Amino acid sequence: MKMGQSIIWITLSVLIMSSCVSRKKLTYLQYSDKSIDSDEMTVDLRGSVTPSTYRVMPYDNLYIRVITPDPEWSSLFNIMPVGAGGAVTEESAALFGYPVDANGYIEIPFVGKIKAGDKTLGEIKTDLDSVFKNYLTDAAITIRLVNNYVSVLGEVARPGRYLLTKDRVNIFEVLAMSGDMSDFSNRQKVQLIRPSPYGPVIKEFSLADRSILSSEYYYVMPNDIIYAMPLQGRSFEINSSFWTLFLSTITSALGVLAFFRTL
């Protein structure tokens, strides 16, 4: 019986030690050999940390609104009629947006095809201002990206798809939207899937190191996918019911054997 009890205690000890997560594994922005000091951080945050401006890619969706003093002229160039107060929701913007085709073009009524692929929203607006001067005077053009979302998967509290409400959103802000990483999330190995004209690019980095602040992946971009990978100990928590049943079975069997030995 003593040997059986020893086996049970050893098994329990291994499971507990394997499923424990150290404080170091849960801490963000630790110092390391790659970390930057405060002086270097000031320089980087003013320069290389600033994200590159997003360039429109095929299959993006653009919301474009042309406003002139004459509503009738405005309606000629807008897919969606201007409602009361000109209110626009995300759903209506997506429904009446201008999809970018496989060759990077959008098609505007009475104007024709306009190149949008591989251009920033500012560059597209400049092109549209130049085009509409041939048709309208005093036209105000609004343009924005409809599919301005980032997705968060894996070991976070609330996995999902989140709207980027400003131009500069960093990865910690996105994790805050999703309720932060769980205790079983591997902060040393976070994967980011970023679309590119040549196909998806997958990068792996650590949020436990302060060097992330000077990384090009500190700021997220539209259509990014962030995957919070699980720690090895997560498998023990998921299978805890199995181990509980397994140990209960062993305990019961040892109890039965001990009972018959006493007879």
Image: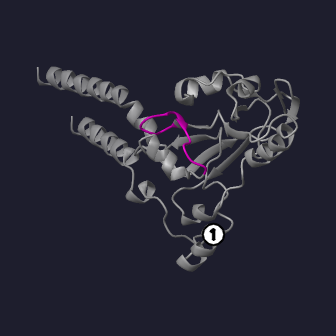
Residue drawn at x 45%, y 42% as measured from the top left:
177
Quadrant for the N terminus in the image: top left
Q: Is residue 114 magenta?
A: no
Give 143 or 35, whichever is nearer the viewer. Answer: 143
Left or right, residue 216 beside residue 104: left
Q: Main secondary structure of the magenta part?
A: loop
Pick the residue in front: 1 or 46: 46
**Camera sees residue 151:** yes
Residue plotted at (42% across, 60% down): 24
Q: Is residue 116 visible?
A: no
Quadrant assignment, res 102 = top right
In the picture shown, does residue 172 fall above or below 146?
A: below
Farthest residue toward the left?
263
Provide the residue span drawn in magenta.
Answer: 154-167
In the depicted structure, whether residue 177 falls above or below residue 114: below
Q: Residues within 10 Å of mark 1 (few under 14, many from 20)?
A: few
Q: Is residue 9 left or right of residue 200?
A: left
Residue 232 in the image: state x and y as whole percent. Answer: 49, 43
Res. 212 image quadrant: bottom right
What is the count of numbered marks?
A: 1
- In the image, residue 155 lies in the stretch drawn in magenta: yes
Q: Quadrant of residue 144?
A: top right
Q: Residue furthest bottom?
A: 39
Question: x, y percentage for residue 77?
Answer: 76, 27
Dot 1 falls on a residue whose secondary structure is: helix
Residue identifier under label 1: 46
